[in-house]
Amino acid sequence: MNAKAQNVGIVIVSHSPLVAKGTADMVRQMVGDSVPLAWSGGNSRGELGTDAEGILKAVEEAWSEAGVAVFVDLGGAETNSEMAIEMLGSPRSQRVSICNAPIVEGAVIAAAEASGGASLAKVVATAEELSP
């Protein structure tokens, strides 16, 4: 098993596909391929919004047995992320955490922490230290 598969995965969820993809690009530039990474942006029609099925797909794409940290930009993204986690089902849903942290800074710092092999709890705690 490679190191990437053992590290916590990162998912970025934004109402804007450009913000989600741009944040994912920043994370990838900072940590390379050392963490599983995916993003979901926009609704199912490609407009501003979020989509629970798209988020579920991103969580599955970034899946790691170590867990997945999800970063969201606004309330609707959080609600749809919660729905996606429920759709994932037990026991995997218990290994996914939504981070209360700024989306860009939080995702970058979380990915750096995850790239060192930190636990999901440590990755989330480090990112959430950025919240006011």
Image: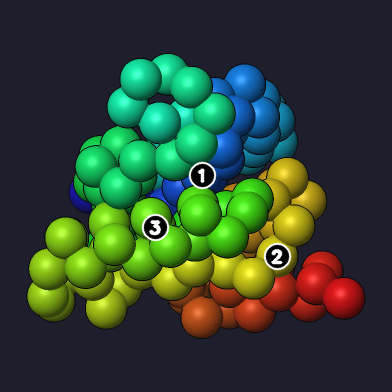
| Whether label 3 touches label 2, CB < 8 Å | no
Task: Please state which amino acid type lies under the numbered disc 1.
Answer: Val
Q: Which residue is mark 1?
A: 13
Q: Nearer the viewer, residue 33 or 96?
A: 96
Query: Which of the 4 image quadrants contains residue 61?
Result: top left
Count of labels in the image: 3
The answer to whether marks 1 and 3 mark residues whose Cβ atoms lie closer than 8 Å is: yes
The residue positioned 64% from the left and 70% from the top of the image is 100
From the top left corner, tell me how far across and down residue 94 is, in percent: 27, 78
Q: Is 115 located above or below residue 42 in the figure? A: below
The residue depicted at 64 percent of the width and 79 percent of the height is 125
Q: Which residue was labeled with disc 3?
A: 81
The quarter of the rendered structure image containing the C terminus is bottom right
Pick whichever, 86 or 26, lies toward us. 86
Position of 132 with respect to 41 (left or right) is right
Element under disc 3 = helix
Element type where label 1 sits in the image: strand
Tell me the crowding category of disc 2: few under 14, some 14 to 19, or many 20 or more residues within 10 angstroms, Cα based: many
Which label's residue is closer to the chain start, 1 or 3? 1
Which residue was labeled with disc 2? Answer: 101
Q: Mark 3 belongs to which amino acid?
A: Ser
Q: Is residue 60 left or right of residue 98?
A: left
- Relative to 17, residue 98 above or below: below
Q: Callout 2, which amino acid?
A: Ala
Question: Which mark sits nearer the N-terminus, 2 or 1?
Answer: 1
Chain-order first, disc 3 or disc 2: 3
Q: Marks 1 and 3, how far apart in space?
A: 8 Å
